């Protein structure tokens, strides 16, 4: 009798477990929407840069939704939850936490500046929310985190190609390093100095300045006195505009000015505001509008169609990061952040900037970097030679010759 009762109980338990598994599967397939979060500086001095990033995210979300949503979840639509960090690290952390706790997001894309991305990713790591970061500091993927990934190149890679270009093409022997003093600028200055010294160049001047400064005259006069062959510069958009404007006013001439990673120098607003002063500037960057990678031409065309202007690398990095996150959700077939993280770790795709696979840090193992130059108001790829669509104009013409 006891044996029969035990057997009956076992059958009931098996049936209940099967029912639970079936219910979970049904629930997963009945998902109507998936919430992902995105955090950018949408107010304050970096608002225009934040808006370009947001445009890139929105474009990819709309493309996925219009193509049938997340198919592995029965066509569930992606709902984008947007937050403004105002360019403030503390606000970036608190807004990220709000998106996780109140909005119940399952993934995040953000946040442009390294100083706001670092605290935001501390929060996502604590809550175990997978994040695809858009910022260049090596610290972002250098803290042993499991939930933070970066598809585009970190500052080490953009510093290396920038210095290599100065050595191979410009034939520079002396350089000045002029960079803003936030997490990104500090990291870039450190790696550019090492790369330049390793390449046999003399660093004749190294100066950091507060982002948003109103006057770079004292630093630029030091540059003029030091007479470097080239300048390695990092600054956000207002800094970049100010730098070239005051270089012209002070008649500071170099063979090349190159911005590793771009920051504000690769912002479309830099081209609009600086106008002719932006001509001939070089940027060591992770994306180019003329690159032949899959999806890039379509991205450029669709962005122009929707927003009425060409995309810049800010929009491109956010578009690519969103693609990576949504691809992982599709492959995970789940809204469970842990399963999404596991899918992110197994990413193996090629998109608008090149191939993407992550190492144990969450860093893309591929460099995916090129040098572009502003020629006739447009960024064109000039290095390496095998992917260049135009020849670099070196040296940059003196201001009096333009």
Image (cartoon, rainbow, N blue to C red):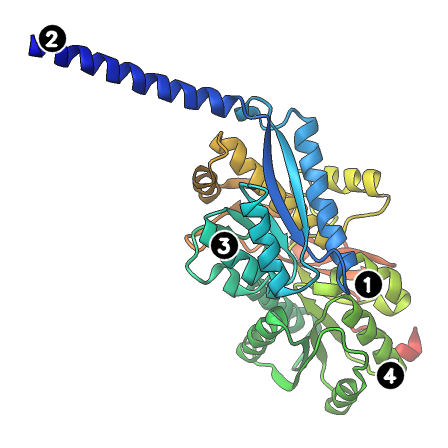
Q: How many marks?
A: 4
- Find out whether the residues at labels 1 and 3 contact each other: C-beta distance under 8 Å: no
For the residues labelled 4 and 3, the Cα–Cα distance comes to 41 Å
User: How far is the residue under mark 1 from the one under mark 3?
Assistant: 28 Å
Identify the residue under disc 4.
251
Left of 370 or right of it: where is 156? left
Res 46 quadrant in image: bottom right
Query: Within 10 angstroms of label 2, few (less than 14), some, or many (20 or more) residues?
Result: few
Viewer-nearest of discs 1 and 4: 1
Q: How far is mark 1 from mark 2, CA to CA?
A: 80 Å
Residue at image mark 2:
4
Q: CA distance from mark 3 to mark 2?
A: 57 Å
User: How busy is the neighbourhood of tag 1: few (under 14 within 10 Å), some, or many (20 plus)?
Assistant: many
Q: Quadrant of the C terminus?
A: bottom right
Q: Which residue is mark 3?
A: 363
Name which of mark 4 and mark 3 comes first in the sequence: 4
Give the mark, 1 or 2, whose residue is nearer the N terminus: 2
Classify mark 3: residues with Cα within 10 Å, few (<14), some (14-19) or many (20+). Answer: many
- State the residue lying farthest toward the bottom: 225
Q: Give percent across and percent down for residue 325.
A: 56, 41
Q: Residue 207 appears in which quarter of the rendering? A: bottom right
The residue carrying mark 1 is 270
In primary-sequence order, the first of circles 1 and 3 is 1
Check the image and report above or below for 217 versus 72: below
The residue closer to the viewer here, 103 or 249, is 103
Residue 65: image x %, image y %? 67, 29
Q: Are marks 1 and 2 in contact (CB under 8 Å)?
A: no
Q: Quadrant of residue 87?
A: bottom right
Distance of mark 1 from mark 4, alpha carbons?
A: 20 Å
């Amino acid at each position: 009798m006891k044996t029969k009762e035990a057997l009956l109980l076992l059958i009931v338990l098996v049936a209940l477990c099967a029912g639970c598994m079936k219910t979970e599967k049904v629930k997963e397939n009945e998902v109507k929407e998936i919430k992902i979060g995105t955090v950018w500086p949408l107010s304050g001095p970096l608002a225009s840069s934040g808006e370009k990033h947001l445009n890139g995210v929105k474009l990819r979300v709309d493309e996925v939704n219009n193509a049938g949503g997340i198919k592995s979840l029965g066509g569930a639509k992606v709902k984008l939850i947007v937050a403004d960090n105002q360019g403030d690290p503390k606000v970036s952390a608190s807004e990220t936490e709000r998106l996780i706790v109140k909005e119940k997001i399952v993934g995040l894309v953000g946040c442009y500046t390294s100083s706001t991305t670092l605290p935001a990713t501390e929060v996502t790591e604590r809550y175990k929310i997978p994040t695809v970061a858009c910022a260049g500091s090596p610290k972002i993927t250098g803290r042993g985190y499991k939930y933070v990934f970066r598809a585009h190149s970190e500052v080490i890679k953009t510093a290396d190609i920038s210095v290599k270009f100065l050595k191979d093409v410009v034939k520079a022997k002396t350089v000045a390093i002029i960079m803003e003093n936030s997490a990104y600028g500090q990291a870039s200055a450190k790696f550019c100095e090492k790369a330049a010294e390793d390449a046999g160049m003399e660093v004749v001047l190294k100066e950091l300045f507060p982002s948003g400064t109103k006057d770079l005259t004292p630093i630029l006069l030091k540059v003029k006195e030091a007479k470097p062959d080239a300048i390695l510069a990092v600054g956000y958009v207002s800094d970049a505009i100010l730098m070239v404007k005051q270089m012209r006013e002070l008649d500071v001439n170099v063979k090349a000015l190159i911005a590793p990673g771009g920051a504000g120098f690769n912002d479309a607003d830099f081209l609009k505001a600086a106008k002719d002063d932006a001509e001939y500037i070089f940027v060591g960057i992770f994306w180019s509008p003329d690159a032949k990678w899959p999806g890039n031409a379509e991205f450029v065309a669709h962005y122009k169609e929707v927003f009425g202007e060409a995309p810049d690398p800010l929009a491109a990095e956010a578009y690519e990061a969103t693609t990576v996150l949504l691809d992982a959700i599709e492959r995970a077939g789940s809204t469970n952040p842990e399963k999404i993280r596991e899918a992110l770790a197994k990413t193996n795709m090629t998109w608008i900037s090149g191939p993407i696979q992550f190492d144990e840090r969450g860093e893309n193992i591929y460099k995916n970097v090129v040098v572009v130059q502003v020629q006739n108001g447009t960024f064109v790829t000039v290095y390496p030679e095998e992917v260049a669509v135009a020849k670099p104009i070196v040296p940059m013409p003196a201001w009096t010759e333009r």
